[in-house]
Image: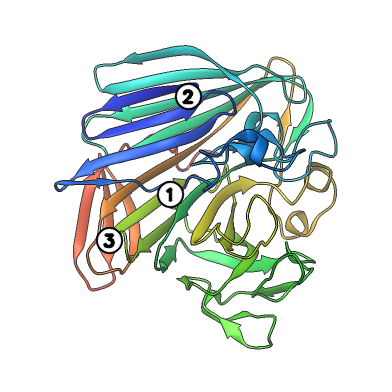
Amino acid sequence: MDEITLTAQGISVSLDLAVGHLAALSIETGGRVLRPLHRAPWLDEPRESLPAGLSEGTVRLSGDFLCAPFSRSDVEDAPLHGWPANSRWDVVENAATGEGWRAVLRLCRKVMGAAVEKTLRLRHGHPFLYQEHAFVGGSGAISVAHHAMTAMREGGRLAVSPKRLAATPDAPLEPDPARGRFFLAYPARSADLAGFPTAAGGTTDLCDYGMEPREDFVTLVEADHGGPGWTAVARRAERDLVLVLKNPAELPVTMLWISNGGRDYAPWNGRHRGVLGIEDGRTAIGHAASIGDNWLKREGVATAFALAPGGRVAFRQVIGALPLEDGLPPASLAVEAGRLRLEMAYGAVRQTPFDGAFLRLGEA
């Protein structure tokens, strides 16, 4: 695999240049090595053993990647999740810095006429990858999302920043019982994440990742709370806490993809288990829907970035992990000067080094 690797004290990340996916993230802390990101089980299988016609992003599915657009590419001709998730990135810079490591990459293709840049940063002693994507020039509008994925052998528990509501789309990802299965009701919505409707007529807690076979998708809309948007996943068997942070002004929704053996056809074959996609975005489902009328716009939520010749739009995301022994995620999280403060569910306070200025909170 054609990769580059960035390394700083206590952390390293590798990027698959063929598709721009994060191939691996390793964090050394407390005498342990944490690996918070998921890799598809077919990644090491021969390409000829996989079905013909798969997008390169599915063939090389790993870690996190940029979707532009998110889901269907029905404005410009491109594969699912767009060219940034399916085609090559060139290395512009890749070198150690005084504070850690910095790499800049550029997508070989353009999106809506815009050049697409990816900047990855590591800082010594920080258990986080800091990444920024930018669109330079172009015209029209583009929907975007990250596609961070973690996986759990025995499930886990989520906590999230305050959300206004949660909603499923009109139809499930796998409506045909001959091909897969789902657990949530479609369409459905609720302001109570602990009481979301299920297909069977009951309710479920969206923050509890159990191990029932399912393929589900639900969008969480950020509330107006003034802090960072965040998702924390306490993985039981892995004994760690996976953290994903964003600026809600840039990425106002978080889409959860719950993929636990809910697809029976190749290459999934019921073996894609315990996976949670934490997909922070500015998007509806599909490019045309995102730039047209959609339910999120009617809720006052932005679903695309406007592009312009000579302009530049950018957004940021942070991924990291901490060791955790009790399986309980934090009750709250706050960015302080040089640190991230976690108020744990049992009353204790944890702090870890964090570049609080990176997310540019408070900026539109």
Mark 1 lies on residue: 244
What is the quadrant of residue 249 in the picture? top right
Above or below: residue 258 compared with residue 33: below
Which badge, 1 or 3, is on the more N-terminal residue? 3
Alpha-carbon neighbours of circle 2 within 10 Å: few (<14), some, or many (≥20)?
some
- Secondary structure under tag 3 reads loop
Amino acid on which the number 3 mark rests in the picture: Arg
Mark 3 lies on residue: 239
Mark 3 and mark 2: Cα distance apart in space: 30 Å
Most foreground residue, 272 or 87: 272
- Residue 277, percent from left and from top: 54, 54
Amino acid on which the number 2 mark rests in the picture: Thr
Above or below: residue 100 compared with residue 320: above
Mark 2 lies on residue: 119
Which badge, 3 or 2, is on the more N-terminal residue? 2
Q: Residue furthest top?
A: 92
Which badge, 1 or 2, is on the more N-terminal residue? 2
